Amino acid sequence: MRGHGWKWLLCTPALIVLLLAASGPLLIVAVYSFLSPGNMGGVVWEFSTEGWFRVFFRRDIFEPDLVEWNAAHLQVFWRSIWLSLQTTFICAVLGFPTAWFIATRPPHTRTIWLFLITIPFWTNLLIRTFAIQEMIRNNGTINTVLMQLGLIDSPIQMMFTEFAVLLGMAYVFLPLMVLPLYAAMEKMDFRLVEAGYDLYASRLNVLWHVILPQVKPGFIAGSILVFIPAIGAYVTPRLLGGGRTMMLGNLIALQFGQGRNWPLGAALAMLMLVVVVGALILYLRVVGGNDEARRG
Amino acid sequence: MRPAVAEGRYSITRLPGFGLIAVLTFVMLYLPIIILVVYSFNSGVSQSRWEGFSLQWYQAAFNNAQVRDVSLRSLWLALAAASIATVLATLAALGTTRVGRFPGQTMIYALINQPLMVPEIVTGIALLIFVAAVKVQTGYTGMGYLVAAHTAFCIPFAYLPIRARLETLDPALESAAADLYASPVQAFRYVTLPLMVPGILAGFMLGFVISLDTVVITEFVKSAGQDTLPTYMLGQLRRAVTPEMNAIATLFLALSLVIVTAFFLITRTRGR
């Protein structure tokens, strides 16, 4: 269409709001990460790389020249990455059969199953985390049932452990894995599966050599869609984990609360952003490459 | 249709164990929520031992002035944010659909979708910093910050269905209107806009649900006395809670469910 060069101006109001209340503040975070912390929170307008330095290192209280790795921070980074990877793995293991199950239903019931996966996706994260909390508390459903069955004498401590955070994240993010996997399976060419069986391939062989290569883009998309919110998780580790199972999101929040070190918090937030943007670029490459393959 | 289920006994789509895992997954997804709902009707104070049916916890929730206060705030905040976001997203969709490529297009898409990509905690502390600075400068501490933050967060969610709807519209319809001497404004008012309604409704509903669900951003932007239902729950859930919380969660759940179902019906049937 020609003569519509002015049309993009219609985006202006939306862009102003987005710049003011979403993108613009991110630039301020980048600036704040290079300032000095104020005594009561906030910042002092003095350039400093101390915030970034403290992300990885710490100084000895008595001898400021003595520098060592900040073990507490490194532990949180490692826990965030490890728990997010485990969450992604669990979601993949449960999500693949689930997506396959939905994709192989007859068309009219398929919509219902798909709807059932979508509902939790749109249900408040807090409510779903609360539901898991109810299950795993010391006097929660699981422990009560196990004790009534006489299988255990005293409740198993599940709350405030890494297991609780892992369980909560897998529960909350599972639909994000199932939906792209389902989308990939729906586009799959089932004649190839049939051809595989005609050529006397075993079920395992068909799964490995025929089905998996076809749904691989869905797998990668799902993995990244689960990994990104898992790395950025704040509510789930806060409610199900405790102070000892802190993740990166909680460490960032801490710097703006009791920690009162805004530049360090800003630097940690930028670090998280870098990890997420890296994962996103990977995702766009996979999805983009997939589009080209379809066109070609 | 694709052969969803192959005929004959040797089904090509059967993979041993997959059905079982899938059914267990669905059970695991729904069991905790169902238990949560069931115990909201418990007559006792326990959330894991059933002591009989009662509506006392719903009564308690309704009589809790703070719960009423935060619920109303959540609802009007969602209404305000979703309404503004829908108007802005509709304009943006009109500005970016069926216009061909233009300079800065990628930039605009990136800006619109940015809230979807950045973790909420990062947006939250970014807004905390920004709002703190603005508060010092202006002295304003009202709800405006929350409305702005929620609106920005809702824009991409409202934009997606509106744009999707707009893309399915046949450009010939507008040409036909022009051929019949409709001015561009008339063509928009009487042809394009009515056809966009399902998309706009869907966008509004999505924005509304998203605003209702937003907890991390609200937690960092709110001033004292501006708790919403999710931030109130976040605060309460760190302590031991009574089934009153189950009752609140159930009502909240029911509201989301109604909106999501309506959203599905609109996009499935009329949006086709």
Image (tube, rainbow, N blue to C red):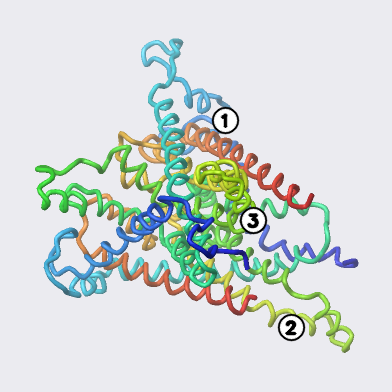
Q: Is residue B187 left or right of residue A166?
A: right
Marked residue chain, label 1: A
Numbered disc in front, either 1 or 3? 3
Q: Is residue B123 left or right of residue B66?
A: right
In the image, what residue type sits under mark 3?
Arg
Q: Is residue B216 left or right of residue A154?
A: right
Query: Where residue A64 sits in the image (x, y, percent)?
Result: 43, 13
Q: CA distance from mark 2 to mark 1?
A: 51 Å
Marked residue chain, label 3: A
Question: Between A114 and B103, which is closer to the camera in this rendering?
Answer: A114
Q: Does residue B102 show up? A: yes
Marked residue chain, label 2: B
In the image, what residue type sits under mark 1?
Phe
Whether the residues at callouts 2 and 3 have beta carbons within 8 Å, the answer is no
**SS for dot 2:** helix
Circle 3 residue: A191
